[in-house]
Amino acid sequence: MRLILPLLLAVPLLAQPDLVPEPAWRAIFGAVSARQIMEDTEALSRRHRYPNSRGFLDAAAWVQERAAEAGLINPRLERFDERAPFWDPVEATLDLLAPETLRLADLRDVPVLLMERSADGEIEGELVDAGEGSRAEDFANLDVAGKILLTRRSPGRLWPDLAKRGALGVLSAASPRFFGRAVPAEATAWQQAPRGAVAFSISPKLGTELAALRRQGPVRVKMRARSGQSAPGATALLLTEMPGGAPGRDVVVVAHLDHQQPGANDNASGSAAILEAARVWRQLIGTGALPEPRRRVRFWWSTEISSEGKYFQRYPDESRNILLAVNLDQAGGERGADNHLIAILSPDWLPSWADDLIHQIAGSAGRLAPPEHAPSPLTLAPEGSQQPLRPVFWPYAPLSDHVPFVDKTVRVPAISLAVPSLSVIHTDFDSPARLDPTWLKRSAAVTLAAAAWAANAGPEEANALLRYSTSQAASRIAAAADRQAQLKQEERRLDSFRALDPALDIEPHRRRLRAVARALD
């Protein structure tokens, strides 16, 4: 009975319709264009979009024009001054001079060749292999005077001492790992230059080849680096909004616009997908397939994490005006890979209704493309995969633009979505050709659905989510190692529903969860 009782308590709550009904899903999936998202992703991928760069501002201006075409209004670019000047790569070449002459790399072919914030210069010298090159002992017994350093990692803070010893520049063949996944040996990583160094990023494959050549005898190379710099520098946040909707408890849809070129999945794809979500939302309102939002909806394109944090520092009362943030960081996955829709859950200090909202909506979308049979054609894109839509829920991790919203000083609930490409992000291999159009379509659709639900939620919708959340909470309590601690978290989650509707009666739900916890103790 102790095991059966919580299930009995939850059963009446399980039989309820999806928060997004099937006709709405059909309208959304039917209207979202993977081709349009891909075209916009390609346009952004042709730009260097480093933080604190003219390239970022150029990309923001491009997005602003497209946002206006999509029907968004009141554009504003919030700029945040930086001590460092704007920095944009202009030209970089790496040449082998001896034992033979050969062009090894060119910025036009390898957009991340010139490390971000590299110094300008034209230098040539003998190559010295420093191995890992990130520890003082790696250089202790090396003669670096007049030499160019070949490393497996950037020397970072060691550079000033190496420069004093006469080192000329750095070639770093770094191979970053994301969640244990190494990038391909042919891929070149986005890296930050040691301050004051002429520094290039090269692929592990090229690094291995140069190290092997160096073991056979002296190797001489030439580095030519030129950037565009102007002061004062600034990071920025582009803000727009949809017409209509009452301000005061707004929904923010956000994607970071910055990163290296091409940065297709991370995050030109997310930036393009929320632009398509805005277009489709306006279109479906026009046809009557979706209602006009009750609440104001804002669309933001950010410098990842930092610009929103600075925005809330500049406008500390703004957090009171935001009901929910929906973040999309990587929309297209990787063609040929086993892709999943990732949702990052709320931190322990901010349990909220947002987790169960995305759990229900992503699960509802997934039922249109389940693993046990062929997905609905609505969820597919031409030239895209036919993979099932399987949502995966990660515990809170400070990885993307949800971070400044859920910060303890801001405390805005956030949904953070991604279809990551962990084997190529932050490299020159993160190109549009590697994206899966089916996942571009799905990412935009789920983002739109979650934001539209929150923007339109009235008492009826809030009660429907409250019932679903209570059933989920009962399951979480039953599965918890410390049920009393979990009960406290779930009661705090119930309290969060008052932001949706202050008149909600949450006490019956609180009593039900307490009964579940008692039955299991």
Image (cartoon, rainbow, N blue to C red):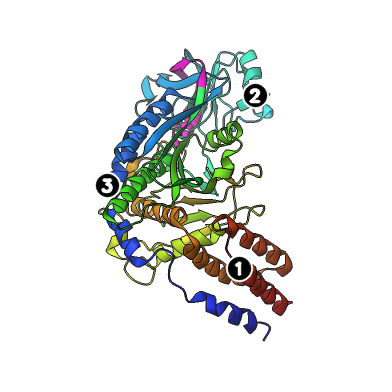
In this rendering, position of residue 443 left or right of residue 501: left
Q: CA distance from mark 1 to mark 3?
A: 39 Å
Give the residue at x 31% y 68%. Answer: 374
**Residue 447 drawn at (x, y percent):** 42, 52
Q: CA distance from mark 2 to mark 3?
A: 46 Å
**Do the numbered discs 1 and 2 sit on residues whose CB atoms are within 8 Å?**
no
Most foreground residue, 143 or 495: 495
Residue identified by numbered label 3: 35
Q: CA distance from mark 1 to mark 2?
A: 51 Å
Please state the extent of the stretch shown in magenta in the rendering: 205-233
Residue identified by numbered label 1: 473
Q: Is residue 103 visible?
A: yes
* Rendered-image quadrant of the N terminus: bottom right
Q: Is residue 224 visible?
A: no
Residue identified by numbered label 2: 158
The residue under label 1 is which amino acid type?
Answer: Ala
Q: Residues within 10 Å of mark 3 (few under 14, many from 20)?
A: some
**Residue 333 drawn at (x, y percent):** 40, 50
Give the residue at x 45% y 62%. Answer: 361
